[in-house]
């Protein structure tokens, strides 16, 4: 075998590996921001605009929390196709989505967190995007 045959075989193997994984290549964060509460506060208002497809698929806000705290998230926008998903970043992938099995396109969610760790609050839209929103986040 010569160098070019080995290189071509290697490239084919890499391509096959990439195609066979379930990695969502189209999932691109339009915005990523850490949630910080003002001193002595347990809530925050986060502002943004629903992601445009040319910029990314979702806005992500990362929040650190403890097990058994109650997280409340409320998305306010005139974009009727906007919604929020919440993931536990330190949870097992089989049960890391806290909102996925509670209905489609949620705009409000409240629940007790299952574990200490980081949580991802993700704002999506099925529209063209570019519509202002406010994400109210509180933890108690």
Image (cartoon, rainbow, N blue to C red):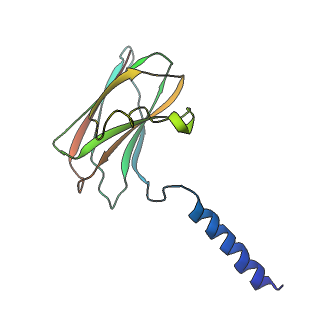
Number of marks present in the image shown: 0
Q: Residue at x 23, y 54 (%)?
A: 127
Q: Residue at x 55, y 32 (%)?
A: 91
Residue at image position (70%, 80%) is 8
Query: In the visual, does 105 lie left or right of 80?
Result: right
**Which residue is outermost to the left?**
78
Q: Quadrant of residue 46?
A: top left
Tell me if 100 is positioned left or right of 92 in this view.
Answer: left
Image quadrant where residue 59 sits: top left
Q: Is residue 129 left or right of residue 84?
A: left
Determine the residue located farthest toward the right in the rendered image: 1
Up-down relation of residue 37 to residue 60 (above or below): above
In the rendered image, which quarter contains the C terminus? top left
Name the image quarter holding the N terminus.
bottom right
Task: Kindly identify the residue that appears in the image at 76 percent across and 83 percent down.
Answer: 5
User: Residue 83 is drawn in which quadrant?
Assistant: top left
Res 139 visible: yes
Where residue 104 appears, as percent x and y from the top left, is 30, 40
Residue 137 appears in view: no
Q: Position of residue 50 (x, y in %)?
A: 27, 48
Q: Name above or below for residue 140 compared with residue 101.
A: above
Q: Percent from the top left, x then y, of residue 117?
A: 54, 27
Front one among 12 and 4:
12
Residue 11, image x and y in percent?
Answer: 67, 74
Q: Nearer the viewer, residue 27 or 135?
A: 27
**In the depicted view, which residue is nearer to us: 60 or 106?**
106
């Amino acid at each position: 075998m010569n160098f070019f045959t080995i290189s071509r075989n290697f490239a084919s193997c890499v391509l096959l590996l990439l195609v066979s994984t379930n990695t969502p290549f189209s999932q691109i964060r339009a915005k990523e921001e850490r949630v910080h509460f003002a001193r002595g506060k347990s809530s925050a208002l986060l502002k943004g605009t629903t992601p445009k497809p040319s910029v990314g698929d979702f806005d992500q806000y990362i929040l650190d929390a403890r097990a058994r705290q109650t997280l409340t998230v409320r998305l306010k926008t005139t974009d009727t196709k906007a919604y929020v998903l919440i993931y536990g970043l330190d949870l097992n992938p089989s049960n890391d989505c806290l909102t996925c099995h509670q209905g489609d396109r949620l705009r409000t969610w409240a629940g007790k967190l299952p574990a200490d760790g980081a949580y991802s609050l993700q704002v999506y839209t099925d529209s063209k995007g570019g519509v202002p929103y406010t994400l109210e986040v509180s933890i108690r």
